[in-house]
Image: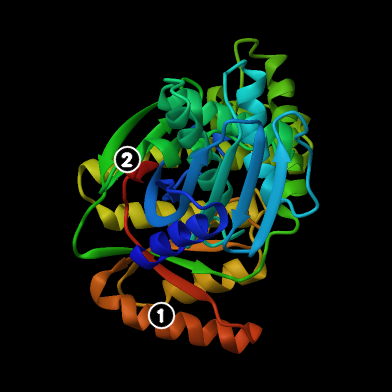
Amino acid sequence: MEKLIDNVKKSFEKKFGRKPLLLASPGRINLIGEHTDYNEGFVLPGATDRAVIFAVAPRDDRRCRFYSLDFDQDYATDLDHLHKSEWRWPDYLQGVLDQFLKGGYAIRGLDLAFGGNVPIGGGMSSSAAVEGGLAFAVNHLFGLNLDLLSLALLAQRAENEFVGLRCGIMDMYANLHGQPGKVMKIDCRHLVHEYYPFDRSELRVIISDTGVRRELASSEYNVRRRQCEEGVSLLRRYYPEIKSLRDVSLQMLEEHRAEFDPVVWKRCAYVVGENERVDLACQDLVRSDFISFGERMKESHRGLRDEYEVSSPELNLLVNSALKIPGVLGSRMMGAGFGGCTISLVEAGAVEEFRSRVSADYRRETGREPAIHVVRIEAGTRILEG
C-alpha cells in the first residue's frame, strides 16, 4: 500500500505541480446479505485493506482535471459542463460533483490523481471507493461539514442518476463507516448500523476474482430490482402495510405463490430468506460460531445461484473448488454477479492449499488464472496526509 500511496502522490505532483491532500478510500467485502440492500433489508459488509488512493487539491476556478493511474488517462471538464464521458471512469467522479452542485453546496474545481488495488469490476465495489472517496475529499476541502451518512447518500445518488445504475446504499455506507476488525449489520431502510467483531487471528477472508468482467450485471441488476418491486406490488393487495420485501415473510410468499409469476416468486423467496440469514449470521458472530456462519455463506450462494440466478459458471467453479478444501468454512459469490468475485472464510493454515488448488482447478476448467486476494477488515475512508 505504501508504494501505491507514493505513486499516486508523485503522479499528482508531476501532473499538477503542487502538494495534495491524500486519502484512502477502501473497497468493501460483504460477508452475507446480497441484493437485499435495495429491498430495504439487511447486509453485513466491512471495509477492506484494498483501497483507492486519492491525491487532490482545490482550484480557484471551476475547472476539474482528473488523472487515473490505473488507466493512464487524463480527463478535463468544468463544473458548468459535466457530461458523460466515453471512458466511463470519469463519470463516477463527475456524478459526485454533480450531486454537490444539485445540493447547492459551494464548491470549486479541483485537480485529482487516483489509483488503487481494488479489483475493478470484481465485486469489491471499486466504484463506491471512487465515489465515497471523492465525496469525503470535497466535503473536507470545502468545509461543507456533511456527516458520513449524508456523504454515502450523495455518493449513491451519483451512481443512480449520473452513472445510471440503480444500486443500493450498502457499498457507499460501508466505504465510509468501516472500522478495523469489525463488520457492520446495516439496516438499509433506517440507515443505521451495528458493529460485530470479525478479527479472529486463526481465520482469513479470501477474495477470488474470476477475471470475468460483469457485462450483464448492470442490465440484469435493474431487471432483478423490477422483479422484486413486482412481487411487493402483488402482496400489497393483501398486506397494504408492506413497503418492500423487508416486510415480507416466507409464509406470506407461500400463501400467494399461485398468483406469482414463478420467476418473480423465486426472486422474492431468495431476498426474504437472505434477510433471515443475515440476522442468524450476526447471532453466529456473537457466539463466535464460525462453523455456522460458514454454513450461512453456503446457503447464500445456493440462493444466489438457483433462486436469484445471478451467479455464473466461473463463480460456481470457484465456490465448488473452495468447498472441497479442508479448512474452508464457507464460500459464496459476492457482489452483483455474472462475474466478479467469490468470498471465502478460510482457516489460516489452509490458505496456501486454497491458493494452489483453487488456482489449479480454475486453470484446468477455464484456461485462465484467478486473482486471489487475502484481505483484512480495515477502516473506512480516511485522510492519510495533508
CA–CA distance in space, label 1 to label 2: 28 Å
Q: Which secondary structure lies at badge 1?
A: helix
Q: How many marks?
A: 2
The residue positioned 22% from the left and 41% from the top of the image is 286
Q: Which quadrant would residue 349 be assigned to in this image?
A: bottom left
The residue positioned 63% from the left and 65% from the top of the image is 72
Residue 355's place in the image compared with 101, above or below, is below
Q: Nearer the viewer, residue 114 or 185?
A: 114
In the picture of the structure, the residue carrying the numbered disc 2 is 282
Q: Is residue 172 visible?
A: yes
The residue positioned 72% from the left and 31% from the top of the image is 161
Q: Position of residue 276 (x, y in %)?
A: 45, 37
In the picture of the structure, the residue carrying the numbered disc 1 is 355
Q: Nearer the viewer, residue 19 or 215?
A: 19
Question: Given this view, does label 1 or label 2 mark the residue nearer the observer?
Answer: 1
Q: Would residue 117 appear left or right of 195 to someone viewing this image?
A: right
Q: Which quadrant would residue 278 be assigned to in this image?
A: top left
Q: Position of residue 114 (x, y in %)?
A: 53, 54
Q: Is residue 257 visible?
A: no
- Image quarter hosting the N terminus: bottom left
Which mark, by number, is residue 301? none
Q: Nearer the viewer, residue 255 or 385?
A: 385
- Image quarter hosting the C terminus: top left
The residue furthest top is 240
Amino acid residing under circle 1: Arg
Q: Would residue 318 appear left or right of 373 to someone viewing this image?
A: right
Identify the image's colour scheme: rainbow, by chain, secondary structure or one colour.
rainbow
Q: Residues within 10 Å of mark 1 (few under 14, many from 20)?
A: some
